[in-house]
Image (tube, rainbow, N blue to C red):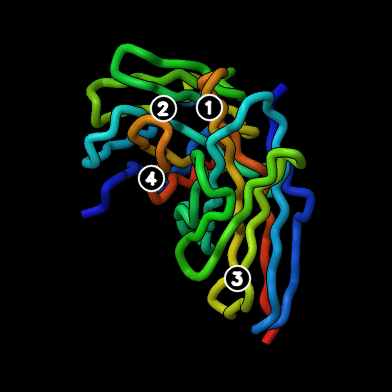
Amino acid sequence: DADVTQTPRNRITKTGKRIMLECSQTKGHDRMYWYRQDPGLGLQLIYYSFDVKDINKGEISDGYSVSRQAQAKFSLSLESAIPNQTALYFCATSQGWDEQFFGPGTRLTVL
Amino acid sequence: AQSVTQPDIHITVSEGASLELRCNYSYGATPYLFWYVQSPGQGLQLLLKYFSGDTLVQGIKGFEAEFKRSQSSFNLRKPSVHWSDAAEYFCAVGARNFNKFYFGSGTKLNVKP
């Protein structure tokens, strides 16, 4: 089984809908991250969590919210999706500042 | 503001040729430095990392990188590229003082037969 899983893997939705992307990890890491990837922009950090009670905004948090339900689970919500949130979304985990392990990604399309 | 710059968006090299991918960062203190590779349709995989100590670090798949504090650089190198190295490469910086993590915009590597 994969160490970092993301659901769903693909999602097509309409403008104004609420969407939740989920991430689970089995590595026992303390830190979890949500990134979005757009062509030519690399990965931009949306939110990150150093532990269950420590959640922080990244570079592009507007329009997104997160919930760290447990050490192993970190979900990303788009309260009212808009077309420019169409992107590839990655969850990642790390133990402290060590390497991040990435999930397979969720491809989100907002029509 | 802290940032990571990868000045080359696309690079094409012939198989067997040497490779150097550039990475520059803007951060006052010594950062934690990483190189990741992303194959098409895949997530990111760590190639190598630098935290402290020897400034020349070895990674997987025959890659190495050198930290140069005076140039704020962490360039990735490989002496002989293989066709399977075609992918996108990302430099990343952990800015401990700011509790932030930054990725460069990536360099897409094409390998000619």
- The answer to which image quadrant residue A101 occupies is top left
Residue pictured at 51% horizontal, 21% vertical: B99
Residue annotated with mark 3: B86
Q: Which mark is residue A76?
A: 2
Looking at the figure, which quarter contains the N terminus of chain A? Answer: bottom left
- CB-based contact (under 8 Å), mark 4 and mark 2: no
Q: CA distance from mark 2 to mark 3?
A: 31 Å
Of B65 and B47, nearer the camera is: B65
Residue annotated with mark 4: A101
Q: Is residue B86 above or below residue B99?
A: below
Secondary structure of the residue carrying numbered label 3 = loop
Q: CA distance from mark 3 to mark 4?
A: 21 Å
The chain identifier of the residue carrying mark 4 reads: A
Residue pictured at 41% horizontal, 16% vertical: A55
Residue annotated with mark 1: A46
Secondary structure of the residue carrying numbered label 1 = strand
Which residue ends up furthest to the top in the rendered image?
A53
